[in-house]
Image (cartoon, rainbow, N blue to C red):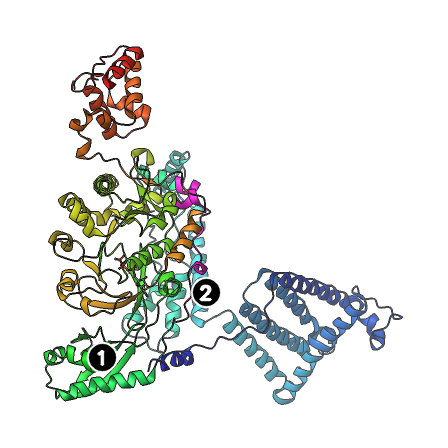
């Protein structure tokens, strides 16, 4: 079945006709210019033939010979060609051929459409034939006019239909030519005639008006118009309105009448009457006022900016950034599904047998072979209870002696019952194959992720931005880390560093280290942290809270820009409608990845759960998306509040039905076979997917490729967040003081001004950190207490006293 598919497809493919010869650019130049020059040469030769043809007549039979001298301006070749085309060919209409040769050269040089050129040749040849026949009729004594062809054709026609018949035939030929070539119809002709008549009438009226200028009313009107024009002289005049009755209008209507029956009725008849109304003498001319498009100030400014600089390009700073090539990903020898007919038959028989043993008859059975499992879709006999088959899951598993059998009863939307049976030899779905797939390459999604292949071997691509957050769970060693790498790899292959940033949390410390290499391209971090990848739990809390601040900031920016989501905001920013001086900036998507969430929840509990839940609830619109993976899908890890906000879930194999229920709200994940076999749900159906496999060396190669390119000066900085541990209590402890404490103290003493904003400016700190240092300075007795809006009093007068104070403190 599956084998036949590609064959059928092949048969249906339209046969592409290859062009007979295709010229490259150089050949086009050479061939094109040759044709252009040949056209010119022919023209010169033909022109000369009119004057010298007779003189050269006698030597034509001796050509070609160096001894012979010809009068033609193009010498022997010219004489011979002219004789061939004019004398023995078409007469004077041979000039048309010199034009056609010239035109062919131009078409080749400019690479214009060949079909058009062929049309020119066709119509050109026809008109040449017609003209030469016409000349043959009137000037049959002069070969120069008609050429042999014109003469012969004439003689031939006249022999059958006589002179009058020939004239009529020529006329008919002309009408046919004009009708087809210039698409002339009787209606068009009538219409053109009416238009001329109307123009003539209005000209006549104008002339009459000019002749009687002293008619009272008219003169007053003319005077009024004149004054208006005078007043208007300085102001720019609007363009004259296009006349209501446009050229095309009658044509469109007449074109429709072409296809109408002889006696048009109903609506169409009405349409035909429109041009007749135009003919009415009492028709009142109507002028349509120009529609004024009012533009706001910002629109004008942004339009001008866009006209001057083009749309804002966020990728410009790393304009030469190259996306990783496909070759960095491995090809696998066991890739591609191989059909084992015997295995299929055997399994089918066992399923049928087992069901028959329980008195369940089957009407039909169909197999779809996937990378790891084969889906047998059965239609049971009428009257069989579905639950009966569902209960036979274990019996079927026993008879097939296979792990991981899943029964889907019924398959939603299909009216069949599905039995998924693992293949004896599973195939690897390589990351390369899914990344190279059309579906991924051509996807227009915001954050496309190629997860793997479905049971029908289709690449499965989803948009993380639509999910909007993803929960991944599965027992250890079942493919979670590979799944996370597949997600990250997909984004690296599709998104520029300016468009997406990752916040990586890796409590296991080893899973995501490879991504360190792309820190300055793709990672985001807290301002004063050394590593972008977070392995320490306290730092996770700070980062999550910092993301909450980023979320609030982004919402504020969206509100000020009157946008509902990040996509709208970025479009507006790119169109230069948002001023960076007002705090606006291009917003990259932020993807937070937590590998091993259980560990976090166990150690930090509510402190982690609260910001995660907040982000999950609110962050979708402003482009922050969460991917959370866990080995332990128990209810105290995946709590109700987390579950409620993560509609998209991936389950790798788990050990118990309870775990499966925690992740998917149903069983199924316990029946998977591991090694990347997974179930995906986005709130409704479960889809079985074989996860794409990406190995550590592949990830290393990709990160190395990206890491070796020009980067931003630093990772994307998240807003500063100081946790409760940074509060005043700890500050009293000298060892807990900020690294910049001494420097800050010196600045304050020199300036004699105890303000946090001074520190912010001088030390380039965030508000929170500067405030914390001020608190520490207060605890150390360097500045006084808080005095509302006034700066704090500085207690130390000079640097020497400061040194003395701090030294005493250390003792
Ligand atoms: N999609 C896949 N295709 C083929 N093999 C896979 C796939 N995913 C995982 N495997 C196999 O399973 C092994 C374990 O995968 P992985 O390290 O991702 O598991 P894990 O769930 O992250 O485990 P842990 O939780 O202990 O980190 C891999 O080394 C690989 O051999």
Residue 312: say if magenta. Answer: yes
Provide the residue span drawn in magenta: 305-332
What is the x, y in percent for residue 410? 16, 76
Q: Nearer the viewer, residue 213 or 336?
A: 336
Above or below, comparing residue 370 to residue 235 in the picture: below
What is the x, y in percent for residue 661? 13, 63
Q: Nearer the viewer, residue 761 or 640?
A: 640
What is the x, y in percent for residue 442? 37, 61
User: Left of 27 or right of it: where is 478?
Assistant: left
Which residue corresponds to mark 2?
A: 193
Q: Badge 1: how crowded within 10 Å, few (<14), some, or many (20+)?
A: few
Q: Nearer the viewer, mark 2 or mark 1?
A: 1
* Alpha carbon separation for disc pair 2 and 1: 90 Å
User: Left of 287 or right of it: where is 419?
Assistant: left
Picture quadrant of residue 111: bottom right
Above or below, comparing residue 283 to residue 503 in the picture: below
User: Left of 170 or right of it: where is 722?
Assistant: left
User: Left of 202 or right of it: where is 535?
Assistant: left
What is the x, y in percent for residue 557? 25, 39
Q: Quadrant of the C terminus?
A: top left
Mark 1 residue element: loop
- Outermost residue, right direction? 67
Above or below, comparing residue 135 to residue 703 in the picture: below
Picture quadrant of residue 224: top left
Above or below, comparing residue 306 to residue 439 in the picture: above
Which residue corresponds to mark 1?
A: 401
Q: Badge 2: how crowded within 10 Å, few (<14), some, or many (20+)?
A: few
For the point 18% across and 28% down, the residue is 730
Mark 2 residue element: helix
Q: Nearer the viewer, residue 218 or 405?
A: 405
- Outermost residue, front direction? 811
Q: Nearer the viewer, residue 670 or 436?
A: 670
């Amino acid at each position: 079945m599956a084998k036949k598919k590609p064959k059928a497809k092949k048969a249906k493919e339209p046969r592409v006709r290859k062009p007979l010869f295709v010229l490259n650019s150089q050949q086009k130049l050479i061939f094109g210019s040759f044709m252009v020059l040949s056209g010119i040469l022919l023209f010169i030769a033909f022109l000369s033939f009119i004057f010298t043809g007779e003189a050269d007549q006698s030597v034509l039979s001796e050509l070609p010979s160096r001894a012979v001298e010809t009068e033609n301006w193009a010498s022997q070749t010219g004489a011979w060609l002219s004789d061939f085309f004019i004398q023995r060919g078409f007469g004077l209409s041979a000039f048309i051929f010199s034009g056609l040769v010239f035109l062919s050269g131009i078409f080749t040089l400019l690479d214009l459409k060949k079909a058009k050129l062929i049309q020119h040749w066709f119509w050109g040849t026809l008109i040449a034939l017609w003209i030469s026949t016409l000349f043959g009729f009137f000037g049959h004594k002069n070969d120069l006019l008609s050429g042999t062809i014109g003469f012969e054709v004439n003689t031939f026609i006249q022999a059958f239909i006589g002179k009058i018949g020939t004239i009529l035939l020529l006329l008919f030929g002309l009408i046919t030519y004009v009708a087809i070539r210039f698409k002339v119809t009787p209606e068009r002709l009538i219409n053109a005639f009416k238009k001329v008549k109307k123009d003539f009438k209005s000209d006549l009226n104008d002339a009459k008006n000019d002749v009687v200028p002293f008619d009272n009313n008219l003169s007053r009107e003319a005077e009024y118009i004149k004054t208006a024009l005078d007043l208007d002289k300085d102001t720019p005049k609007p363009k004259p309105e296009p006349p209501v009755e446009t050229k095309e209008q009658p044509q469109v209507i007449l074109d429709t009448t072409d296809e109408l029956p002889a006696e048009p009725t109903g609506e169409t008849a009405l349409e035909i009457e429109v041009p007749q109304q135009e003919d009415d003498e009492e028709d009142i001319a109507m002028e349509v006022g120009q529609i004024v498009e009012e533009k706001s100030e910002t629109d004008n400014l942004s339009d001008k900016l866009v006209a001057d600089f083009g749309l804002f390009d966020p990728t410009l700073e790393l304009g030469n950034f190259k996306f990783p090539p496909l070759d960095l990903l491995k090809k696998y020898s066991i890739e591609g599904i191989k059909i084992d007919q015997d295995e299929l038959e055997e399994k089918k028989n066992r399923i049928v047998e087992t069901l028959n043993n329980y008195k369940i008859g089957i009407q039909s059975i169909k197999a779809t072979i996937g990378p790891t499992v084969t889906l047998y879709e059965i239609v049971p006999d009428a009257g069989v209870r579905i639950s009966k088959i569902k209960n036979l899951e274990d019996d079927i598993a026993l008879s097939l002696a296979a792990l991981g059998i899943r029964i889907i009863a019924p398959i939603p939307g299909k009216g069949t019952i599905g039995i998924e049976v693992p293949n004896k030899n599973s195939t690897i779905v390589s990351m390369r194959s899914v990344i190279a797939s059309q579906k991924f390459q051509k996807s227009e999604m915001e954050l496309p992720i190629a997860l793997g292949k479905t049971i029908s071997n289709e690449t499965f691509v989803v948009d993380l931005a639509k999910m909007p957050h993803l929960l991944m769970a599965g027992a250890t060693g079942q493919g979670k880390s590979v799944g996370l790498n597949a997600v990250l790899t997909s984004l690296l292959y599709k998104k520029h560093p300016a468009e997406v940033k990752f916040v990586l949390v890796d409590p296991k410390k080893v899973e995501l280290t490879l991504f360190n290499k792309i820190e300055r391209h793709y990672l985001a971090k807290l301002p004063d942290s050394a590593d972008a990848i977070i392995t320490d739990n306290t730092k996770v809390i700070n980062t999550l809270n910092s993301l909450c601040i980023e979320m609030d900031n982004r919402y504020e920016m969206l509100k000020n820009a009157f946008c509902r989501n990040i996509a709208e905001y970025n479009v507006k920013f790119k169109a230069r409608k948002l001023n960076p001086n007002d705090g606006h900036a291009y917003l990259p998507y932020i993807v937070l990845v937590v590998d091993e969430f259980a560990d976090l929840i166990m150690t930090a509990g509510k402190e982690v759960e609260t910001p995660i839940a907040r982000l999950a609830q609110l962050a979708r619109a402003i482009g922050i998306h969460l991917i959370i993976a866990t080995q332990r899908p128990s209810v105290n890890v995946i709590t109700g509040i987390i579950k409620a906000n993560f509609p998209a879930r991936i389950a790798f194999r788990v050990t118990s039905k309870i775990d499966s229920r925690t992740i998917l709200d149903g069983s199924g994940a316990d029946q998977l076979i591991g090694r990347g076999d997974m179930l995906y749900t986005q709130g409704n159906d479960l889809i079985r997917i074989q996860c794409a496999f990406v190995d550590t060396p592949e990830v290393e190669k990709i990160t190395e490729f990206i890491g070796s390119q020009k980067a931003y000066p630093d990772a994307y900085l998240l807003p500063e967040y100081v946790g409760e541990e940074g509060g005043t209590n700890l500050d009293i402890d000298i060892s807990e003081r900020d690294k910049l404490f001494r420097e800050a103290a010196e600045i304050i003493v020199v300036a004699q001004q105890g303000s946090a904003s001074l520190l912010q400016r001088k030390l380039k700190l965030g508000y929170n950190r500067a405030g914390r240092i001020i608190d520490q300075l207060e605890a150390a007795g360097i500045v006084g207490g808080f005095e509302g809006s006034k700066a704090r009093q500085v207690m130390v007068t000079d640097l020497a006293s400061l040194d003395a104070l701090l030294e005493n403190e250390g003792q």
